[in-house]
Image: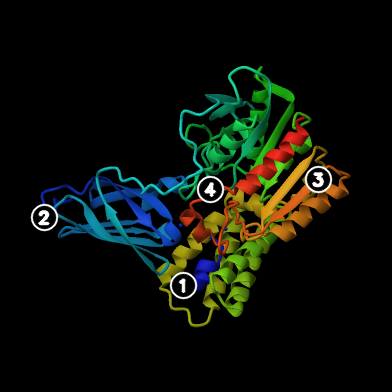
Amino acid sequence: MKRLLFLLFVCLASLNGWGQDIAGDWSGVLKLQGGIQLRLVFHIQPSESGYDATMDSPDRGKKGIPVTSVSYENSVLKLTVASIGAEYEGALGATGNIAGTFRQMGQVFPLNLSKEIVEKEKAARPQEPVKPYPYYEEEVTFENREDGVTLAGTLTLPQKEGVFPAVVLVSGSGAQNRDEELLGHKPFLVIADYLTRNGIAVLRFDDRGTAASTGNFATATSYDFSKDVEAGVKYLKTRKEINKAKIGLAGHSEGGIIAPMVAARSKDVAFIVLLAGVGTRGDQLLLQQQDLIAEASGVGEEERKRAGSINKGAFDIVLKSTDTEQLTIALTDYLRQAIEDIPDAEESEESKETFITTSVTQMASPWTQYFIRYDPAPVLGKVKCPVLAINGGKDLQVPAKVNLEAIKAALDRGGNKRVTTKEFPGLNHLFQECTTGLPAEYAAIEQTFSPVALNEILTWIKVQTQ
């Protein structure tokens, strides 16, 4: 039961014995499989009933997650975060730190908390550039006036003076900063550094509502993000250092959906690069993704088919829905019945309800509804500029063959003959050289982005900007 729930769609007033009040901010680093490290911060405040708390997950861009219960007795702190099915228990020691364990979905991880800010262990990232850079770097802001959003980012230029072709980097799903920082890697920093060293200006920026950019990320869809990217293109056109006829986009994952949106409606986009771009409708992609990751994780065929059937049923409800309130009710009823029908279910009623609530909240969000329904093909058919689409052969999140073929077919139907597609054997979704392609490997791999793939991108852009 625990593993099946994991497969279902979710792709998380007293003094103690030492004389120290438990109230305050407590931070720690959760160490998961594959070298993944996630920072957690608990904000604990006194209340009439004892204590209240919220939790932040900075690496996931989440703040103020409600802690549903707080208990502190005999120097033992217990926290429950029902929305993600998590519990924490730890004991305050003589050093003033808390040693304990974090439990979620049947898994147990050590987690020590401190009132000092705890940083993640620095992983070896040999591709990350070290200042001073041999090029010009400037912090910039620009406006999406239609939505009232200010985007903050970094513009890198081969030299402070001159006129250069340029690329706007478009991030993947989730709240991403300008470096597309995730799991200890900064792919966009590495890409921007490589291109700028080779004569290409690069603009990368924080997603709306993330880091230094304003706006609300939680209510935005891929279409909303496309307007932010278009604002970036318009900003570059105001810069005297940029060749206005040679501005392109490079989008990773969801960014590979967004870049064609902008190119299809803006003649200012001279070319686009799709890095693990999506060519199939969102629900179909998610079903492929979930099954491939489960298979690579050792899940049996019968269990995968059961999970896939439940997921497909939930996605079909989203596809037919026209009202979010009714969608929430329908999904809740559907998942509750689906879980009841699973044989040998051993989870507690509280765990089942937590899972249902978390899943429904995610599936009914504006972004997920939009993504499940979105078919990239019609928009790709309107793209007339040159397109480079590349994928890793071991990508389990956006399978290479089916998506590259779908992208090329859509562009062909639209009459675009300036299309290059390529699959790189042995590379995962982040374009790292890998063993299995599983997301659990991402953090443990030192390489951030394959040099072979970087060279392919640069060589192709050079041809387009000659």
Cα distance in 3D space between marks 3 and 1: 44 Å
The image position of residue 294, as x and y in percent, is 57, 69
- What residue is at 75 percent from the left and 31 percent from the top? 465
Q: Secondary structure at mark 4?
A: loop
- What residue is at 83 percent from the left and 38 percent from the top? 384
Residue under label 1? 2
| Residue 323 appears in the picture as rendered | no
Mark 4 or mark 1, which is nearer the start of the sequence?
1
Residue under label 4? 448
Q: Which of labels 1 and 4 is toward the front?
A: 4
Mark 4 neighbour density, 10 Å: few (under 14) some (14–19) many (20 or more): many
* Residue 154 versus residue 433 in the image, above or below: above
Amino acid of disc 1:
Lys
Q: Are marks 2 and 4 in contact (CB under 8 Å)?
A: no
Nearer-the-camera pick, 414 or 33? 33
Cα distance in 3D space between marks 2 and 3: 68 Å
| Residue 381 appears in the picture as rendered | yes
Cα distance in 3D space between marks 2 and 1: 37 Å
Mark 1 or mark 2, which is nearer the start of the sequence?
1
Label annotation for residue 132 = none
Residue under label 3? 419
The image position of residue 425, as x and y in percent, is 66, 59
Cα distance in 3D space between marks 3 and 4: 26 Å
Label annotation for residue 17 = 2
Q: Secondary structure at mark 2?
A: loop
Q: Secondary structure at mark 1?
A: helix
* Residue 72 versus residue 197 in the image, above or below: below
The image position of residue 20, as x and y in percent, is 14, 48
Cα distance in 3D space between marks 1 and 4: 32 Å
Nearer-the-camera pick, 64 or 49? 64
- What residue is at 46 percent from the left and 69 percent from the top? 352
Nearer-the-camera pick, 338 or 55? 55
